[in-house]
Image (cartoon, rainbow, N blue to C red):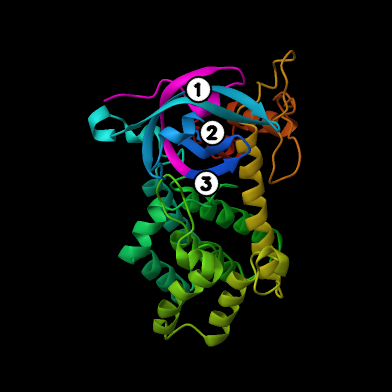
Amino acid sequence: MAHKKTFIRDLTAGQNISDIFALSQAQRREARNGPYWQLTLTDRTGGMEARIWAPQSLQYENLKPEQFVAVTGQIASFKDQLQMNVTDLVLVEPAGAGLDLTDFLPSSAVPPAELLAEIEAFLDRELSFKPWRTLCAKVLADADIRAALLTAPGAKSVHHAHAGGLLEHTLGVMRVCAALAALYPSVDREILLTAALFHDLGKAFELTHGFSREYTDAGRLIGHIQMGLEALEPFLRAAKDLPEGLAVHLKHLILSHHGELEFGSPRRPKTVEAFILHYADNLDAKINTVNTALENTADPEDVEASHWSEYHRTLGRYLYQPMRTPRTETASDARSAAKKTAPRPKSALLRAMGIADPEE
């Protein structure tokens, strides 16, 4: 089985490259000097824009997403983004080339099956209200939903954009919601965690799950919020023991989790739980976006290197990898260590009773 030699995250401006990539987007465009191909090449570490300029572009008639290509080219920097100028490209059959497909599919660091098992264990620990437990269990046991969740990305490109990304994001939002609910005792913890589980359920069907991660027709026409509610509706109708007021509140939490109308939210948050879910969703997505952007920056301890990311178009700024505070022992650590190591005082009570102390 053949493995890639170079991955996109390791490429630098000025570098010459010859390797195999997955083709996730391919569009033929027109320029002053003739037609050119606008491509997006991907592997498991990310994606990169590429161009085939005229007259070489005339050699290629039928480039399309979901193909594998062997390319030769040079990496350039264009508007603070790396881009490959392709000098040669050949279509490759993955089976014939003996490719390891895991080199090309971005995926969560934790296997999706483990993430789903962790979500189920989390719900089992945290939920005590039987209708919520039953609803969550039945939805996650549905064969079509379960299969889609195991491969779905969390978004097209901005955050958690890899196989298993939706599960990773869902678990992250559930954890943030649980932490915030612990700070505010009046919050309905169980409906909040149930809504966290289902808030992005529609994303399992909004995007394709291959290399290109394109919007499905329903995803583009309806959107993941409405699609998630439609997927959930049959289970809610079957939940005869779930009070109508709770079902309506759950729907509101899902409908309002984008926060504002201009961000695609059909409704703005109108309950405490809705506000918490909105901010938890936004926080988990933003942290993943920033961490992903900073993955290729230098080690913070390397004082000679730059710790700035490339310009991030979505966030509209450069991002910085700061120096970390050195880990030192705190007073709490010292007290904890003392409790573990200090000998227990001899028992005066046992001595007075003439009983040998078992610790002596």
Residue 234 is labelled as: none
Dot in front, 2 or 3: 2
Report helix, strand or loop for mark 2.
Answer: strand
Q: CA distance from mark 3 to mark 1?
A: 26 Å
Is 256 placed above or below 63 here?
A: below
Which class describes the residues within 10 Å of circle 1: few (<14), some (14-19), or many (20+)?
Answer: many
Q: Is residue 287 left or right of residue 10?
A: right
Q: CA distance from mark 2 to mark 3?
A: 20 Å
Q: Is residue 189 left or right of residue 186?
A: left
Residue 73 is labelled as: 1
Q: Which residue is mark 2?
A: 50
The amino acid type of the residue labelled 2 equals: Ala
Residue 161 is labelled as: 3
The amino acid type of the residue labelled 1 equals: Gly
Task: Decide which of 73, 203 is in the foreground and name it.
Answer: 73
> Can you give x and y, in whole percent of width and height, for residue 317 in the image?
76, 39
Which class describes the residues within 10 Å of circle 3: few (<14), some (14-19), or many (20+)?
Answer: many
The residue that appears at 61% across and 27% down in the rendered structure is 296
